[in-house]
Amino acid sequence: MRGLTRSAALVAGALFISVAAAEAGWQDAATPFDVKRLSQLDESRSKGLSELSSGQVSGDAAAMREIASAPAQNISASELTGSWRCRTMKLGGVVSVSYAWFNCRISGHGGRLYFEKTSGSQRISGYLYPGDGGGFVLLGAWTVKGEPKRVYSGSNPGYGAESTPDDAIGLLSGLGGSHAKIEFPYPVQESTFDVMELKR
């Protein structure tokens, strides 16, 4: 009887740890650098749009402005799950650029939502966490096609460095219908503000 009680306690403990991990907030998994970056989302977007208007542009400036400026809407996990077309737009820096459409996917993975860009030379993947004011926070990492998939560094970026060029934090929001976007404030490289448009 004592053995059964101990086994039951171990199972209960394991279930508690599993549930706690699944329900952990994004702040528990993010680096302090990325928590700060996300808090500056509005500022980053505003600066990126300003630099888009005054700097060099390669690609569809009107689309960049429209998607970056579009009001965010709530979107549910069930609406997100499945395959998407996606394109990245980089605002600010030396030149603002919009890229071609590629493939992305959102699926269940370990009891959580998992985002991945599955085509193109630049890939990104990571877990989605419920955001504080709606939407989902993406904690992901960039990978070049053909290289092993990188994971978000969490609390140990670059052996003590404040940030790594591979880490990415973004806010995924709905845009109505089968349309969404992920906003990336102050990317470590190249631009001032990035936004990825998602469409079905």
Image (cartoon, grey):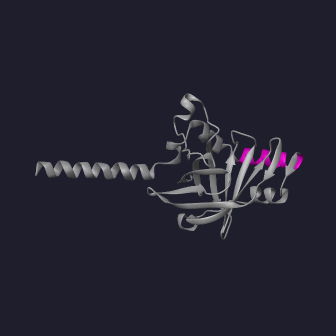
Residue 50 lies in the magenta-colored region:
yes
Asked if 181 appears above or below 142 in the picture, the reply is below
Q: Residue at x 18, y 48 (%)?
A: 6
Task: Give residue 76's position: percent from left, percent from top.
Answer: 56, 65
In which quadrant of the rendered view does residue 110 lie? Answer: bottom left
User: In this rendering, does residue 48 appear at all?
Assistant: yes
Q: Residue at x 36, y 48 (%)?
A: 17
Asked if 79 appears above or below 152 in the picture, the reply is below
Task: Give residue 99's position: percent from left, percent from top.
Answer: 76, 55
Which residue, as the protein is rendered here, is positioned at the far front?
146
Which residue, as the protein is rendered here, is positioned at the far top?
160
Task: Give residue 198's position: percent from left, percent from top.
Answer: 67, 62
| Depth order, front residue of 115/21 | 115
User: In this rendering, does residue 133 appear at all?
Assistant: no
Residue 80 lies in the magenta-colored region:
no
Magenta residues (range): 42-54
Task: Give residue 137's position: percent from left, percent from top.
Answer: 58, 51
Q: Is residue 10 left or right of residue 2?
A: right
Q: Residue at x 49, y 43 (%)?
A: 28
Q: Residue at x 26, y 52 (%)?
A: 11
Q: Is residue 15 left or right of residue 196?
A: left
